[in-house]
Amino acid sequence: MLQATQSLTFHQQLRQATHAAHVRLNHHSLLSQMTRPTLDIETYTLILQAYWSFYQTAETHIRNCLASGMADFNYSDRYKAEWLTQDLAHFGLTPGVDGCCPFTVDLAMPRNRSELVGMMYPLEGSTLGGRVISRHLMHNLGINDANGGRFFSGYGHNIEQLWTLFIQFAERSPQSRQERTQACDYAIYLFETLEAFLDAHVS
């Protein structure tokens, strides 16, 4: 029997609400290749391009929301599209040049603080899974943070600290049941939007 929703922390609610969408994304036909020995550079750089397009859009929304005063949270060291730009550059690719990153992402901007937290949750949580992927990249392709694997290496040794700081911010953000539901709904929406984006463009 599931634990009563009201007895869960907000982090637990987010994790429970997004579990199914998160699992589906992890098993996506493209992303599931990331941990396989058969992963090749062509597929890897395609994933980098897709991620760059998605993160560029999402992080533009985050910048705009924070600039408007929607939330007081220091996100300056957490923007990840630049890491993807660095990784693509290692393989001789530049977004917007010679057909690199030709994808358009349709992602709604968060309307309030709760939805902003819901947007940040999957993006910050991806750094935890990135640690696992990073080990596979090194083992299978010899890729590390200095030669095309900056994005998946994430926050490195600071990951636990930065994850804790984000969760603390999230826990003190949405207060009412409605606000928590809004955050969970947006987090699910982001997972599902990324899945649909991959299906439409790069599967």
Image (cartoon, grey):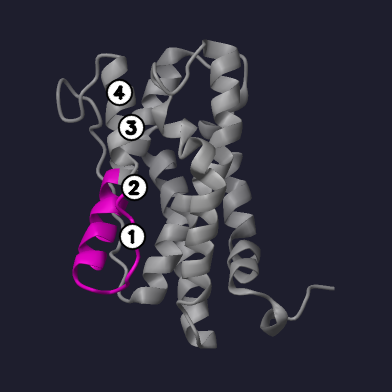
| Residue at disc 1, secondary structure | loop
Is 27 displayed left or right of 199 in the figure? right
Q: Are marks 4 and 3 in contact (CB under 8 Å)?
A: yes
> Where's the N terminus, which quadrant?
bottom right
- Foreground: 171 or 81? 171
Q: Which disc, if any, is residue 77?
A: 2
The residue type indicated by label 1 comes to Asn
> Can you identify the residue that label 1 sits on?
74
Q: Is 72 inside the magenta-drawn segment? A: yes
Q: Marks 2 and 4, Cα distance to the nearest angstrom?
A: 20 Å
| Residue at disc 4, secondary structure | helix
Eyeballing the image, is 175 above or below 12?
below
Can residue 203 be seen by looking at this rendering? no
View extreme (left): residue: 97
Can residue 140 be seen by looking at this rendering? yes
Q: Is 183 inside the magenta-drawn segment? A: no
Q: Marks 1 and 2, Cα distance to the nearest angstrom?
A: 8 Å
Eyeballing the image, is 99 above or below 114?
above
User: What segment carries the magenta color?
Assistant: 56-77
| Residue at disc 3, secondary structure | helix
> Can you identify the residue that label 3 sits on?
84
Which of the two marks, 3 or 1, is nearer to us in this view?
1
Residue at figure coordinates x 52%, y 44% from the top left: 159
Is 73 displayed left or right of 132 in the figure? left
Classed neighbour count for the residue bearing mark 3: other residues with Cα under 10 Å, few (<14), some (14–19), many (≥20): many
- Foreground: 77 or 47? 77
